[in-house]
Image (spheres, grey):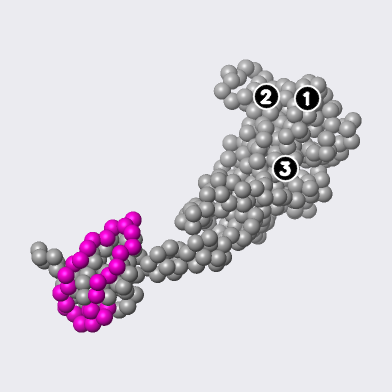
Amino acid sequence: MATLLSPLLIRGAEPVPLLDALGRVLAEDLVAPIDLPTFRNSQMDGYAVDTGSVTTAPVTLPVRAVLAAGDGETAHVPGTATKIMTGAPLPVGADAVVPVEDTVTDDGGHVTVCTAPAPGAFVRERGSDIGRGRPLLPAGTVVAARHVAALAAVGLTHVPVRTRPRVAVISTGSELVPGGSVLTTGRIHDSNGPALAASAAANGALVVSVDRSGDDAEVFAAKLAHATSAAEVVFTSGGVSKGDFEVVKDVLGPRGAEFVSVAMQPGGPQGTARVDAVPVLTFPGNPVSALVSFEVFARPVLRSAAGLPAIDPERRPLATSLVSVPGKRQFLRGRRDGDSVVAIPGAGSHLIAAMATADVLLDIPADTTGLEPGELVRVLPL
């Protein structure tokens, strides 16, 4: 599967609006196009002074003006004070700000400075955060809210990010109906389509279509053609086992698809194909099997293609004992419990509600039949 999906790893870049970059991966190193701050300004509400006029304290100075944030540049008159608000530009010639708490005012337009400030006190110097042309964020950064703040502060409205791999999902089975439908006997809500689409999106993909097909070969073939026309990779669920109505096998088998039984549980029946030069991964139809298959086979490649960091396995001690089926690599639903991990009861691949309570998969080797409390187990974070 890794070879089949390797073309996904060749990505380009695209400029996107700043807010659309959230969660995306920067394609280029970014430098600051301006100084931050862009001008000297006050760090506090207080009084701007020149320290040459306030060498000792207390000293009383006339208040010449009031400056608010957003006001333009003004000139300082030595021996006076300017009432100044946080963020307002420091008057040219002033070199310190005395916080309002360290002053006393009178009704006659004067202020008494109670503490002599040092040069630069409570002044934000131009470029003291970052200077123009200095590195701001490196390529490969996964853009978070704090990065958006910095990018917005330097005035960027668009940023270059890696393109996302385009994914299409098709769930199969005549028993499937969409959410919101009234269920009749024999019918079930389609969970695989939304689950695989959500899994792909959560791991850096752009989901271009989510479709559903019954067991009619012509219908599935038409939906597959639509999917491959828009996507770089297609995930299907169902129709790959050994029953009488295996539509995915029926359509893809004659096109050179390879179907195998992998020695893992859940998720044994797997298939791969290439349709119109687009790789197709065919997962089993049981909901837990489909999700586990995605985690094991698709998630690592999608994250790498999107430029997202790999989710590395952990090793944690078991809180309770467990029994494993010999001969098959088990991926058991589990939950972190402090530093340890607990297996969630119930091995059925239809137990999707139990899957929702898991935050890891316990990766149990095929030659392991049981583990005792305290033994280390490899876990895959979900």
Q: How far apart, in angstroms, are the residues tagged by discs 3 and 2?
A: 20 Å
- Circle 2 SS class: strand
Near-viewer residue (94 or 172): 94
Q: Residues within 10 Å of mark 3 (few under 14, many from 20)?
A: many
Mark 1 vs 3, N-terminal side: 1
Looking at the rendered structure, which numbered label has been put on residue 222? 1
Residue at the disc numbered 2: 176
Residue that appears at 78% across and 25% down: 222
Looking at the rendered structure, which numbered label has been put on residue 293? 3
Q: How far apart, in angstroms, are the residues tagged by discs 1 and 3?
A: 25 Å
On the image, the x and y values in percent for residue 134 come to 55, 67
Mark 3 vs 2, N-terminal side: 2
Residue that appears at 17% across and 73% down: 61
Q: Is residue 339 above or below residue 208?
A: below
Residues in magenta, as a range = 51-78
Instruction: Answer whether labels 1 and 3 touch (C-beta < 8 Å).
Output: no
Residue type, label 3: Ser
Q: Is residue 159 visible?
A: yes
